[in-house]
Image (cartoon, helix red, strand yellow):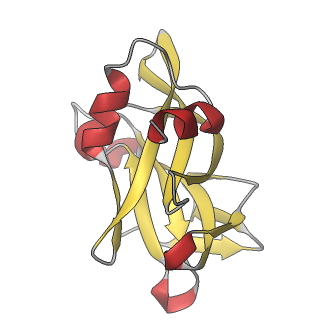
Amino acid sequence: MKRFVLSIGLIALAGCAQAQSWSQMLDLGDHGNLHVVPFTEYLGSDAPLLRNGQRCGFRIGEGAAARWVVTVGEGSTEMMSCDALLEFGTVGPDRNMIGAIYRFRPTPRSSYVGPLVLRLDGDQWVVDDSLLETLANRQSSVETLADLNDVLSQ
């Protein structure tokens, strides 16, 4: 089992992850203020043969109440690799969701920029797969949080 190491606002997995050098305190309306820190986990030889070798996500909250949420590398994004997290913050008409803009790398020779949205499902933060599918089927691309907020406000 891998363990997470917290060091002055940086998140890394011991010995096998890239620390992200930025975190934010987000005001999520009714959900309150939450400390959000991105992470990247390199799976190395632990990755199944047909799966990419990394996962990305966020640590949401602090202390014992913190939740680790994988956004890229599991579920509907299992076959993708997160080349870079470009920006993240609150999104939606009520600013009660977390939006992230990633540069995805579905194959070693191609990449694209696209969004993911996290929403609360009970007391767990989850990737909104139905919204992800809707955004993927749009004619125009969503490459910034401003673009994402424009789409969510329609």
Q: Is residue 24 left or right of residue 12?
A: right
Residue at x-position 24% and y-position 45%: 75
Query: What x and y, as percent, mark residue 80?
Result: 37, 31
Q: In this view, does 133 lie to the left or right of 114?
A: left
Q: Which of 77 and 125 is in front in this view?
A: 125
Of all residues shown, which one is farthest toward the front? 154
Tell me: residue 41, above or below residue 66.
above
Asked whether residue 78 is in view, the answer is: no
Task: Tally the marks.
Answer: 0
Tell me: residue 35, above or below residue 101.
below
Query: What x and y, as percent, mark residue 46?
Result: 32, 49
Residue at x-position 62% and y-position 63%: 37
Tell me: residue 103, above or below residue 42.
above
Query: What x and y, as percent, mark residue 109?
Result: 47, 9
Image quadrant where one finds the N terminus: bottom left
Q: Which of 147 and 65 is in front in this view?
A: 147
Query: What x and y, as percent, mark residue 116?
Result: 44, 41
Q: Which of 39 and 134 is in front in this view?
A: 134
Image quadrant assignment for residue 70: bottom left
Image quadrant where one finds the C terminus: top left
Residue at x-position 58% and y-position 26%: 143
Q: Is residue 18 left or right of residue 73?
A: right
Image quadrant assignment for residue 11: bottom right
Q: Is residue 37 left or right of residue 59?
A: right
Asked whether residue 14 is in view, the answer is: yes
